[in-house]
Amino acid sequence: MVRDGDATDQNGDALVPPLPTNEKRKGKHDKPKPWDEDPHIDHWKVEKFDPSWNEGGMLEVSSFSTLFPQYREKYLQEAWPLVKSALKEFGISCELNLVEGSMTVSTTRKTRDPYIIVKARDLIKLLSRSVPAPQAIKILDDEVQCDIIKISGLVRNKERFVKRRQHLVGPNSSTLKALEILTGCYILVQGNTVAAMGSFKGLKQVRRIVEECMLNKMHPVYNIKVLMLKKELEKDPALAQENWDRFLPKFKKKNVQQKKVKSKEKKPYTPFPPPQQPSKVDIELETGEYFLSAKKKSAKKWQEKQEKQAEKTAENKRKREEAFIPPKEPAKPVDKSEDANNNNVADMAKSLKQKAKKLGMRKSEENINAETYIIGSSEQPSGKKSKKQKS
């Protein structure tokens, strides 16, 4: 449909005006700036806010509120004037509601710094997590940041959670103090959270150490050793551009053998129910006690009791008498070396006797005189006389 006043072509059709084309070219604004390579400009420096940058103030009211536990109520009432005066310098109003148990901060017409409301929100969060007011007020400084780490969801078992949380604190808070010195952060372990205040670099280290501890990846003591080595390596300018992994210790996790839960052997499935266990009446019927009179039953019970008592008495007596039984003396072992020596002596004596006998026989043969054979045997003198004559 062509309306009056619309531009038409020769055929009478309406002419559609061409759409404006926005040329999109990637990196058309990426031009070198004169301040990018200026060595005199520190790009990481956070400049202090000047109220002259925002003389008109805030256009809208921004507010944040947070709840606090009941046990913090008394302390917050005492420390609230200090918090109020600190926030008043930046044009922030604060309110403490004891009925609802909440703290609220909001901007006013006097607020100039747009980011100070975020700092005020962090302040009330730290106060609700049991951080002392003088320490929490330091968060209003531009160079100080905070991080609240939730550790309750990292461990399911309550006992294990308490044990690992205690690893962070250490004996007499020694581990916590060492972490504060090495990271340059204020750390507070309270309930299910860990509140930390410091620089971005320190907060990143604290979060990593806390999560590794709660997940049982690495004990905080080992992380402290690594941080101490890094502190020493930072002092050497020659190692500034090198990789430090070769200097850092590598800790291997040792799996402690846990007690294996004894699993009951599964019985083969049967569709039939197990047999019914016999009742007391059934057992009495089998033994015949059911038909006994009450008097006989009591007599039988008394008899069984007496038998058990006699067995127990005999056992106790045997245990008492065991103390007076002398122990068996060990038999003296026979020394085989002495027997061998005795046998050797006997053999030597026997051999010596035989040698002496042979020697005596030889001497007797040598001392035979021929005259004894010529003269008659009657005139033969005895052996003793011949020896005297010879002498």
Image (spheres, rainbow, N blue to C red):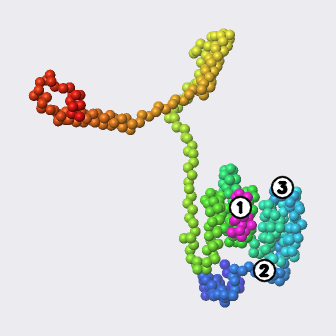
In space, the residues marked 3 and 2 are separated at their CA atoms by 37 Å
| Residue 241 picture location, percent across and down | 58, 78
Amino acid residing under circle 3: Gln
Q: Tag 2 or tag 3, which sits nearer the N-term? A: 2
User: Is 377 left, or right, of 179 in this rendering?
Assistant: left
- Looking at the image, is 25 positioned above or below residue 264? below
- Looking at the image, is 63 positioned above or below residue 49? above
93 or 62: nearer the viewer:
93
Q: Where residue 48 is drawn, which disc sits there?
A: 2
In space, the residues marked 1 and 3 are separated at their CA atoms by 29 Å
Q: Which residue is mark 3?
A: 70
Quick one: SS at disc 3?
A: helix
348 or 321: nearer the viewer:
348
Amino acid residing under circle 1: Ser
| Residue 314 picture location, percent across and down | 61, 21
In space, the residues marked 1 and 2 are separated at their CA atoms by 36 Å
264 or 320: nearer the viewer:
320
Q: Which residues are magenta?
A: 170-187
Q: Is residue 8 visible?
A: no
* Residue 369, quarter of picture: top left
Q: Residues within 10 Å of mark 3 (few under 14, many from 20)?
A: few
Q: Residues within 10 Å of mark 2 (few under 14, many from 20)?
A: few
Quick one: SS at disc 2?
A: loop
Q: Where residue 174 is drawn, which disc sits there?
A: 1
Q: Magenta segment: does it hold 53? A: no
Q: Tag 3 or tag 1, which sits nearer the N-term? A: 3
Q: Tag 2 or tag 1, which sits nearer the N-term? A: 2
Please name the residue shown 66% across and 12% down the image.
299
User: Is 348 left, or right, of 16 in this rendering?
Assistant: left
Amino acid residing under circle 2: Lys
| Viewport quadrant of the C terminus | top left
